[in-house]
Image: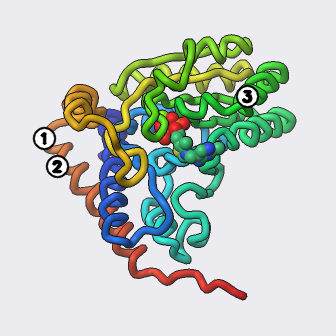
């Protein structure tokens, strides 16, 4: 029996949440190598955007990429294996958390560095006269990178089919945005003549039509747009580096948890079913990946 759209969106968000919780736990037990940046709290952004894209669109994600990858339809097992540095990982265990690639999905952890690359790929799509677009994800902290503005300038001048997604989770590591980002975020894009869509919500059903409008605008007009999403990160920046007041985070979480909001629309039976399906997937991903071999490095 086909499940409802409400169910599918919740499935995506729950998969991200449980995968990230497990990744953080495995990190503490020493099974993961490198680093990991959990997407816990921001799940509705990914579920809304990735349910609005076309198959051949180009995606450029950043250091906080696991949620984007899973919402893209990526295999949790191949991602878990990559986080463990295993041969079966997405890029043979050499990329780790921040450097993954599968189909048209790419990530890189250098803040801002992905923006001109994504713009170039949008230009290639335009030259090929395809209707595909590029989508690039940045955080509030990345608004401080100069290369972003060079890219906005060219994207606007050359009418590139690219969507700039800003996930403003209000912090860059431990720096609150109030002390790092001046003026308004949308004005930065509008200064280059780029259309903006802006939302302050953790409700995937509010975000989804907005994300779809932004994606459709870029595709139909072959012009850039920005989707600015004000969101919350509930977990630490990376593994344990959180200097924020715990009580504030707990009360924000109680109010804005995207999973709690969407769960209220599912029946008890659906909730049981989705928990079980996700738990099987995540367990299988980490258990299989643990048993896999490391790559053999040739001298
Ligand atoms: C060019 C560059 N400078 C510094 C870093 C280290 N760094 C990694 S994530 C991060 C903060 C990013 O904040 P934001 O863009 O708001 O994204 P968020 O982590 O909040 O998702 C920093 C400073 C980096 N990866 N690249
Ligand atoms: Mg941030």
Report the residue at 65% width, 84% height from top: 297
- Per the image, label 2 sits on a secondary structure element best described as helix
Mark 2, other Cα within 10 Å: few <14 / some 14–19 / many ≥20? few
Report the residue at 22% width, 26% height from top: 255
Of residues 67 and 213, which is closer to you in this image? 67
- Per the image, label 3 sits on a secondary structure element best described as loop
Instruction: Give the Cα distance between marks 1 and 2.
Output: 6 Å
Relative to 18, say whether 185 is above or below. above
Instruction: Give the Cα distance between marks 1 and 3.
Output: 42 Å
Q: Is residue 238 left or right of residue 95?
A: left
Q: Position of residue 272 (x, y in %)?
A: 17, 49
- Residue 33 appears in the picture as rendered: yes
Q: Are marks 1 and 2 in contact (CB under 8 Å)?
A: yes
Return the residue at label 1: 268
Return the residue at label 2: 272
User: Of all residues shown, which one is farthest toward the left?
Assistant: 268
Mark 1, other Cα within 10 Å: few <14 / some 14–19 / many ≥20? few
Relative to 194, say whether 287 is above or below. below
Q: Position of residue 275 (x, y in %)?
A: 22, 51
Of residues 57 and 248, which is closer to you in this image? 248
- Residue 265 appears in the picture as rendered: no
Q: Is residue 214 left or right of residue 127?
A: left
Return the residue at label 3: 161
Q: Is residue 267 left or right of residue 257?
A: left
Report the residue at 48% width, 28% height from top: 168
Query: Which quarter is ligand 1 in?
Result: top right
Of residues 36 and 272, which is closer to you in this image? 36
Which quadrant of the rendered structure holds the C terminus? bottom right
Q: Are marks 1 and 3 in contact (CB under 8 Å)?
A: no
Q: Which of pointers 1 and 3 indicates the residue nearer the eye? A: 3
């Amino acid at each position: 029996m086909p499940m409802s759209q409400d169910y599918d969106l919740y499935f995506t968000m729950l998969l991200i949440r449980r995968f990230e919780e497990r990744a953080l736990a495995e990190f503490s037990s020493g099974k993961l190598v490198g680093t990991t940046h959990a997407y816990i709290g921001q799940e509705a952004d990914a579920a809304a955007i990735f349910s609005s894209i076309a198959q051949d669109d180009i995606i450029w994600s950043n250091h906080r990429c696991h949620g984007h990858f899973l919402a893209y339809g990526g295999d949790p097992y191949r991602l878990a294996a990559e986080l463990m540095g295993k041969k079966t990982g997405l890029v043979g265990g050499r990329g780790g958390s921040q450097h993954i690639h599968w189909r048209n999905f790419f990530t890189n952890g250098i803040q801002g560095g992905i923006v001109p690359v994504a713009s170039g790929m949008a230009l290639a799509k335009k030259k090929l006269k395809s209707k595909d677009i590029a989508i690039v994800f940045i955080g509030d902290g990345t608004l401080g990178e100069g290369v972003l503005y060079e890219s906005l300038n060219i994207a606007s001048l050359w009418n590139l089919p690219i969507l700039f997604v800003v996930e403003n989770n209000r912090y860059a590591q431990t720096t609150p945005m109030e002390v790092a980002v001046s003026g308004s975020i949308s004005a930065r894009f509008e200064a280059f003549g780029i259309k903006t869509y802006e939302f302050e919500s953790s409700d995937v059903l509010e975000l989804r039509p907005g994300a779809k409008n932004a994606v459709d605008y870029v595709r139909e007009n072959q012009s850039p747009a920005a989707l600015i999403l004000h969101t919350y990160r509930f977990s630490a920046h990376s593994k344990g580096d959180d200097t924020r007041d715990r009580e504030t985070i707990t009360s924000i979480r109680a109010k804005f948890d995207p999973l709690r909001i969407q769960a209220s629309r599912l029946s008890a039976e659906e909730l049981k079913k989705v928990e079980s399906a996700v738990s099987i997937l995540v367990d299988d991903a980490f258990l299989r990946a643990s048993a896999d071999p490391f790559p053999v490095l040739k001298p």
